[in-house]
Amino acid sequence: MSQDDDDDDEGPPGVPPGTPFYMTPDGHAALQAELHQLWHGERPKVTEIVSWAAALGDRSENADYQYGKRRLRQIDSRVRFLRRRLDRAEVVDPRDQKRRDQVFFGATVTYAREDDSETTVTIVGMEEADATLSRISWVSPVARALLGKRVGDLVKLRTPAGLEEIEVMKIFYPERDA
């Protein structure tokens, strides 16, 4: 196992090793789908190409063979990573949240900044974070500052520009389908 593989298992920065990898049901399903596609879809196809290229003879100058072997290593590394993440995943469904007046994992939170602009983010797992969709990881500085807060709470947030005070304006959790 490479050093990179070991690092993947340590956990998020600032969170003790062994902490579960929280994710939403959608995030968990996406990782399972990626694992399935890599293992049952892409890997068999690349293996077939590598076998065909190896049968051609001289492997040292065979681009198909060399690229295929490199791609197999990438796939295998990602598969190991996904399996470890899924093994340690703790799926948290925000629809099951009972205490909807506080910010917890899965909440969609609107907060006001000092310049009176408002920002809305959804707190999700690390692999689900996507700034373009306003989905932030639960270990991000903003999420960690918001966790446990209620509407009206003022929160000190350390930013690259210095300390900023933000105010929780709204907290939303999705409802269970009837």
Image: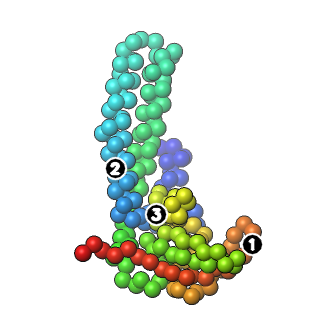
Judge whether residue 120 can be spotted in this image: yes
Q: Cβ–Cβ below 8 Å for labels 3 and 2?
A: no
Dividing the picture into quadrants, the one containing residue 42 is: top left
Earlier residue among tags 1 and 3: 3
Q: Residue at x 44, y 44 (%)?
A: 78
Amino acid type, label 3: Gly
User: Label 1: which residue?
Assistant: 162
Secondary structure beneath dot 1 equals strand
Check disc 2 and report the residue beneath it: 33
**In x, y percent, where is residue 26?**
36, 61
Q: Which residue is mark 3?
A: 125
Q: Secondary structure at mark 2?
A: helix
Amino acid type, mark 1? Gly
Q: Position of residue 131 (x, y in %)?
A: 55, 60
Q: Amino acid at mark 2?
A: Ala
Residue toward you, 27 or 69: 27
| CA gap, disc 3 and disc 2 | 16 Å
For marks 2 and 1 on the same chain, the one whose residue lies earlier in the sequence: 2
